[in-house]
Each structure stands twice: as C-alpha cells, then as structure tokens.
Amino acid sequence: MKSEEAQRWASSLDAVVVYAQGALCTRVARGTLPASGRVRVTGLPRSMDPDSLRAKVVGGTGVRVIEVRVEVDAEPSGTDAAGSLRQEMERLRDVYDAAQARRDRQLSRIAGVAELRPVPPTRKREDPPRRTPADAWLQLADFVDERLRGLHGQLVELEEELSRVEHELSMATDRWARASTDVQPGQVATTVGAMLTLDGSGAVELELEYGVPGAVWVPAYRLTHRQGDDSGTLVLRASVAQRTGEDWAGVRIALATADLRRRTELPKLRSIRVGRRQPALAPSGWREPPAGLADLFSAYDAAGPRPAAGAGPAAGAGPGAGAGPAAGAGPAAGAGPAAGAGPGAGAGPMAVAGSAGGAALPPPAPGGYGMAPAEPSGFATPAAEFDGAMPHMPPPTRSGRPAGGGSPAAAKRAAAPAAMAPMVPAAPGQAAPPPAPPVEAGPPQPSGTELDYASLVLSGADEPEGRRGRLFPHTPYDPVAIEYRRRADAVSALPLPGHAVRPRESAGSFDHRFDAVARADIPSDGTWHTVTVTEIPVGLRTEYLCVPSEEQTVYATLVLSNATGQALLAGPVEVTVDDDFLLTAALPTLAPGGVRRMGLGPAEGIKVTRRTNLRESTAGLRNNTTVLAHQVHVELANRLAKAVTVEVHEQVPVTSEPDVRIEERADWTTPEQDSGPDRHAPGTRLWRVNLPAGSTAALDGGYEIRVPAAKALVGGNRRS
C-alpha cells in the first residue's frame, strides 16, 4: 500500500522538554484507526532528527505500533508570510533610496545657489576705474537669500520624509529578522509526517516524540523579601530561545540541565581471567544469509527488464559491465564483506566499469550485512589496487576452522579472492614484488556502523544482485534538512543576558529537571523569551560584611539557604525588598541543603573606621627577640532604623618559619574552613557584632610578632 492511501491525522504539540542544547517535543494525534492500519500523522518540523522519532499508543486500548518512519512531502503553501515581509522590506528600501536621492539633490541645489557671487568684468589697463553697482549686488544678495530660504524649507520636508521612511524600513527589517520560522518562505511548503502502521481497531490516541535542535535556555530568578523576615520567595524563571521551525503555542514546558546529544548506553564490562582457558569469542551479530535468497527474486527477474531511470551504461565499460549486478560496485567501493551472495545466491564476479577488458573482481564474502554505500562518484577501486585481502577477517583457530563457527565452504569462498587477485607488474630494474599473502579464513566481522540495526535498510529487488534482500547501513543525505538544522543551531551563539550562565556550566556533575506550572507560548524567532517556571521557598537572613583593612565600607549581603531537593543554578536574580526593586545581582549555584552569600552592594547607613598602632620592643635574656605589637581598633556606627548584624573580617599574619612566633591578643574567632567558593583565606579572623538601631560599637584586638633580633620581616616590620 502506498503512503498516499494512508489516512491523514492532524497533530498538535503538547509538551516540550528543553535541554541544555536541543529539545524533545511530544505531539498528540487522535482518530479512528482505519481497516488498513496505516496512518500518516502530519505537522512535524523540518528540522527534526529522523532517528529520534518514537511513537506509542496512550491508554490500554489493545492497539500497538508495528512500524513508524518519516516521510517528507511538498505541497503548495498558499500564503508566503515570510516572503511578504521580505517584499515589504525591499519596497521600503527602494523608497528610502529614492528619498535619500531627492535629499541629496536638494543639498546640491542649495550648494549651487550658495556659491552665487558677483563677478566684476575684467578691466583693461587703459580703461578708467568703474563705479561699483551696489544696487545690483544687493539685488543678487536678496535673490540668493530668498532662494535659499525656499530651498531650505523644502530640505526640511525631505529630511522629515527620509527620517520617517528610515524608521519604517528599520521596523520592517526587524519584523523580517524576528519572523517565526514556523512559516516556510516560498510558494512550496515542505511538510514532514510520520507514517505509522498499527495493529488493532477503534479510537486511538497517539503520542509522537522527536528531538529537534535549535533550543537553548538559561535560568533567571526574582527574589521577594520582607525586612525582618527569615524567609522569602524565589521565583524561578527561564529565558528560552528557539528556532526549531515550529511555534510552541500553549505547550507544557520543562527545563533540563542534561545534554540531549550525549549517549547513554551502558558499557559492556568484560571479566579478565588468568589461566590457559581462553575466553569465548563475543557474538559479532553477523548471520549467514538464508538459503535460496536468489530464488526469491526469480519471478521479478522473469518479468523483463525495467526501463532505465537515467542515462545508459557508462562509456568505456567492459563487456560485462552491463550484465553484472552493479557496475563499479566492488568491495572497496561499498559492497563490503556482506555484499556477496550466500549459498545459492548465484552471484558471479562483479565487473568494474572502465577496466581493461572488463577485468572481474572476486565475489564478496558471504554475510548478512553490508558495508557503507558507494561514493557518490560511482567509481570503484581499480583492479590493480585490489590485493585480494578481505576486510574484517579474523585469524583461523588451531583446528584450521574459521573463527566464529563458520563452515569450511564459507572458508573456501573467503579464500578464493587470494587466488584471483591480479599481480601488480614490477617496475623496470626492480625485482618482482612478492605474491600477496593468503587470506585468513573466517566470517566477516561487521563494524559498529554495520551493527547499528536502527540505520540498516533492506535492499529491494532493483538493487544489484549482490545487495538485494540484504541489510546495509543507510544514511540519507537531505541537504534541505541539513540547512534547516544549521539555521536552528544558530541560537547557540545568541549573547546571554546579564549575569546569565549556561546550565551545563553551572550544573556541574548533576542533572535536574524543572517543570513549569503553566503552559507557555514561545515563537520560533530565535530571540529570548521569559517563562515563569515555579516558586521556590528559601531561607533568608540579611547580614552586613566589612573588611576594614582593605576598604572601610560595609556591604549588605543576603544569606540564602536551599532546603528543597533541587539545585538552584547560577543566574541573574532581581531582588525586591518591601515591594521596592533593589538591584539585579548574580545568584551562585546553590546545591540542595547548601548555604551561600549574595552581595547587595554598599550599605550607606552603617559606617566603619579602623586605626592601627605598632609598638616595637625587645625581649629575652640578651634582648635577642624583637617584639612587634600590632593593635587594631575598629569602630562601627549603625544609622539605620533597625538592628543589624555586622561581620568584621581581620587578617592575622601566617608564618612557616620556626623562629617566628605570632601571639594573638583579641576576642575574635577563627572561621571554619571549607572547600566551597566562600572559603576563607588562611589567617582570617571574624568579629560578629549585633548593633541596635542608632548605636555604636568599638572593637579592639591585636597580635604580636616575635622574630630574632638579627632578622627582619620581608617588606618591613609594620604589617598594617
């Protein structure tokens, strides 16, 4: 049954999962299954990956999917929205060029009139001086002024018209650039459908899942906080851009940090044994062709020759070029080890197009799978370059039988090419080359491409005799689809919003998925669109931080704690405090149960001052120790209308010299060291002070550095 006889079902996009790059779309189609069981579901995008198409029946109706494949059709589009936008843009560009030309001509007229000057006649030497006609000069000046006044008025009108046309042209260009790629340009639209074969009857609901490139997303947040509360609301939003070729209208959106193109097959772990017993060979996946495969097409051959679809035989073909299975389809050109006929196939030697005298190549080795197709040029490997060695041949076992359990007859057929291999003549003055080594017997060992069962295609009756009825890798080349995918991948180069980080960079070694609470609309225009995903409760507390030894400024920070089971990725966050927008900051990656600090900028209501004092003295029995006593005095003033907690950081010197001792004389504390991004530097000391509203506090501390009297600190004894 042809595809045109299948019943057409319309489909609608229901859900989309956007990954770090690419998306996985789910379409839904409903209908009553016809008696033939053949259904064509339409509406798939042109940029889809055909290998990712999956179909299933929703609900326990007893109907199952037997086969699903992709088909591409072309039909008149009726309307060309993208073409009309381009035509409008080109029309406005012509109007703009005409308006600019009129403006330039007006400027040249103004320049010509402005250059009008009175030129007195040339006076000869014997002529007496002439009286200057002042009235004529004034009349000329009045004429120039009046003429320029009119020309400048027209110039103003032309410039206003040019500005208006330029604005319209920029708007039309922007509309054309941002037009959705869901509408294909041109009068012919290419439609992609899924041809399904179902087993069953009755009403059926189908779900089709397929992957598309050209979709990216980055996280964004909006944080709402009330002063005095220890909690807040963090709204997770996402900036999504897609150019997949179809508009996502009213779909369920989910965001994932995983890589859609990463393979997820589990590796095969093989055991290693020590001893004389050798491990059994792993199954290769190769099977002997069934007996009588050539007789399957005897009735087809008896019907007579088919009319040629293209030109006649290639010029220069040997006598057997037209009678063989496929001229120029030798093993090196794509027949491969599996291209030969099995027992009873009746495949003779394959002729090479253009070879002298129609030199015959040996038949390919038997096998159930073939090599990759021939090159587009259609030329086979010359006979002089074929040395008789068959690819993928394992060595024989000690018993002389082929490895893998092949039959002796198969071994003889595999060794036949060695005897039929042509000899390469030696160059003049050189010894004849040694004969080719004998071919090692054994069944063909297919490569990974030949064992990719999803890409294998059964060759039909019109294929050469050595290929028909066998499975061969098939990679269709569709330049239109490749161009659509190339355009779709252009969204990966979009500039990111401020403080945005790509999910794979911030996710690290874990992957998470975030499901949006409501459906969303995202057109296929390749620009960023904001989608609200969900609300996340977080723990918040406001703390103030200062390092007066570096800068006498107090900074406000928010300490966030993630008590949920999902990680919060790095991205921009809009902070709103008491319904007033404060700033847009960068939220760091926050793992489940993690605590991180986020800066909010300087706090002008809290002042800090720091003073230091150094006293140098000697100690010891013979004054052989220099004592450097550093005193630190820090004053804090809270001018806010609320109580605050200020964390003051100080730095104590750290030494690795055994002769140098450091003694601390303060009530500060040593922070706990961790391996996170908030890790403190060695020697950091902390003061945590609670300041009521309008109060002040003084902090005193210090340390002593004891060094031998004969030594001095690098950079001077004064450390602060």
Image (cartoon, helix red, strand yellow):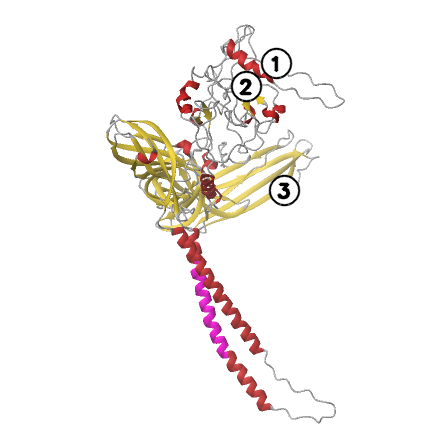
**Which element is circle 3 on?**
loop
Helix, strand or loop under label 2:
loop
**In this view, 499 is above or below 412:** below
Q: Nearer the viewer, residue 575 or 685?
A: 575
Near mark 3 (Cα within 10 A), the count class, few <14, some 14-19 or many ≥20, is some
Specify the amino acid type for callout 1: Pro
- Extreme left residue here? 202
Q: Amino acid at mark 3?
A: Arg
On the question of residue 228 being in view, the answer is: no
Say if residue 448 shows up in the picture: yes
Residue at label 3? 718
Q: Which residue is mark 2?
A: 392
How far across and down, in percent of the image, does residue 81 sit? Answer: 38, 51
- Tell me, yes or no, whether the highlighted magenta stretch contains residue 157: yes
Look at 62% across and 31% down and name the residue there: 656
Q: Which residues are magenta?
A: 149-170
Q: Please state which of residues 15 and 102 is positioned toward the viewer in this rendering.
A: 102
Query: Residue 392 lies in magenta, yes or no?
Result: no
In the picture, measured across the screen, residue 508 lies left or right of residue 388, that is left
**Residue 490 pos. (x, y %):** 47, 43
User: Could you tell which of marks 3 and 1 lies nearer the N-terminus?
Assistant: 1
